[in-house]
Image: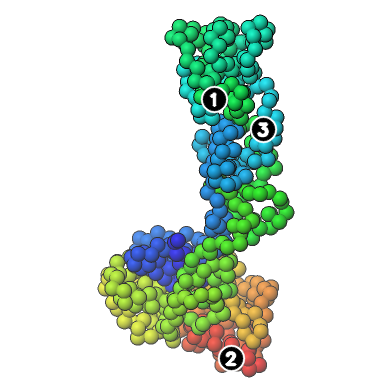
Amino acid sequence: MTLLVFGHKNPDTDSICSSISLAHLKNQLGEKATPYALGEIRKEAQYALDYFKVESPEVLKNVKIQVKDLSYDKVEPLTPYASILEAYNLMESVHVKTLPVISNDGDFIGLVTMQEIAKSLLHQHFNTVHTSLSNICKNLNGSVLVNCGDDVKGRVVTLSFGMESVMDILTEEDIAIVGDRYDIIEYAIDTKVKLLVLTGKTEISDHLLALAKQNEVSIVSVNYDTYKTSNIINQCNYLNDIVSTDNLVIFNENDYADDVKETMLNTNFRAYPVVDNHNKFLGLVSRGHLLNPTKKNVILVDHNEYAQSADGIKQANIVEIVDHHKIGGISTDVPMSFRVMPVGCTCTIIYQMYKENNVEVPHHIAGLLLSAILSDTLLFKSPTTTEMDKKACEELSKIAKVDMESYAMEMFKIGTSLDEYSIEEIVNMDFKEFSMSGKRVGIGQVFTLDIDSIFAKKDEFLSYINSTNYDMLVLAITDIIKEGSYLIYKANDNVISEAFNVNAGQGVFAKGVVSRKKQLVPNLTAAVKNI
């Protein structure tokens, strides 16, 4: 099963680059892994991807259990032109009571059930049969002597009585069943019946075969006697007439298990067809398949809290976490690999993992790792910066063949432009939720070189922030050059004053506060607890 590797919601450069880099490492180590993003990729991360010519990861909506994660039955389908008897025999051999019917192109058409087959068998003495020569030969162990068209439709007549009676009832287009009564056989051919079924391995002369071809009469010779043939031929009918197509409940492989369960509670079918986005049949799912679903295997990078992770994360199997933040509230049922280090960036840890596994870091991965570390440490100005981060950047810049400072400033310039974003988008751009002394707290952070454009809309920012349902919300507008953050908040002034040692007021500058992880979160946590 493929490992899904992703960072936190509202992904920053570290989340994107660490997902791609760790997925690449896993693939090099023989594990199949795919990187994803939990949201739109921001301009700074996109700049790094474009610069090093790396494809953007696909956005992952959630990791909820889907129908495709269930071990549903991969049932062999039939076409509408299979016979009723073939369907019955298949059901018996695989021990199912429902079979799918598909077109020649694999499109799902409907279902045939044992109940419908039973109804058809109870009424098997109806007059008309519509089937094919191949179905008759398959079900009656026969062979085609004259083929004037595979599709046959007509009234079934068993010619087991005298010539006079035969002459009274036999008409053109009939399907006639007869044994080694050659006078009846010749009369049937002269009458131009649609099909002549010869029972008991009856053989006929070349003269009669030629006459049959001339009169366009198909002939099939079967091994069974007349009585058994008469009983079975009705079961050679096409499935068309007993296929259920109305009022079916059909699931797409991408449907969520929770929704499927709800639907099943309100319906009463034995099995439900599963199709893909192109209506191609995949299998049959039933209630039992929901009892022990296969969870998605995921690796979390740059976060380890439920609120920051993918929707449905509790339905997934977390096999590994690589992070540089405080330990959150995630728990698992089974042991996993959990690597958390007090460094400035997750990508610093991942670079170390490359070295530990003796895997060469290619140019484009080196560029992404470097970009993330420079971003998270603010070119080493953040208090979260460690010597390990600096050393990693020195080594990675050589592999990536870039000048760290000039590359970082160009990346910051591209990434901090906020002209295209709405107030709501800016607040939620790099936003994380926390629980502090029972309070629901949101902290957003944006880095920009154009502080004036933010303050020109300060009232609009404040209006939006106050409209949220958080107990407290702080937006930190971080000035990379001044090495500090301006604060717009929904909180008591005394909390802000206590947390950052400032005279609280909307837009106050907190000097030296540039890190959410090491300053904003711990300072606010302590202030909320103390007040």
Element class at badge 3: helix
**437 and 121: which one is in front?**
121
**59 and 245: which one is in front?**
245
Distance CA(mark 1)–CA(mark 2): 90 Å
Q: Disc 1 or disc 3, which is closer to the eye?
A: 1
Q: Quadrant of residue 353?
A: bottom left
**Can you identify the residue that label 3 sits on?**
121
**61 and 250: which one is in front?**
250
Amino acid under disc 2: Ala
Q: Disc 3 or disc 2, which is closer to the eye?
A: 3
Q: Position of residue 505 (x, y in %)?
A: 62, 86
Amino acid under disc 1: Tyr
Q: Is residue 250 left or right of 75 when viewed as pictured?
A: right
Query: Does the CB distance between marks 1 and 2 fall below 8 Å?
Result: no
Q: What residue lies at 47% left-to-right and 64% top-to-bottom?
A: 4
Q: What residue lies at 53% left-to-right and 72% top-to-bottom?
A: 430
Element class at badge 1: loop
Residue 452 can be seen, yes or no: no
Which quadrant is home to the N terminus?
Answer: bottom left
> Reading the chain from its start, which is encountered first: label 1 or label 3?
3
Q: Quadrant of residue 436?
A: bottom right
Q: What residue lies at 54% left-to-right and 80% top-to-bottom?
A: 328
Amino acid under disc 3: Leu
Q: Disc 1 or disc 2, which is closer to the eye?
A: 1
Badge 3 local density, few (<14 within 10 Å), some, or many (20+)? Answer: some
Which quadrant is home to the C terminus?
Answer: bottom right
Q: Position of residue 221 (x, y in %)?
A: 50, 20
**Can you identify the residue that label 2 sits on?**
526
Residue 390 can be seen, yes or no: yes
**Can you identify the residue that label 1 sits on?**
224
Badge 1 local density, few (<14 within 10 Å), some, or many (20+)? Answer: some
Q: Position of residue 216 (x, y in %)?
A: 52, 11
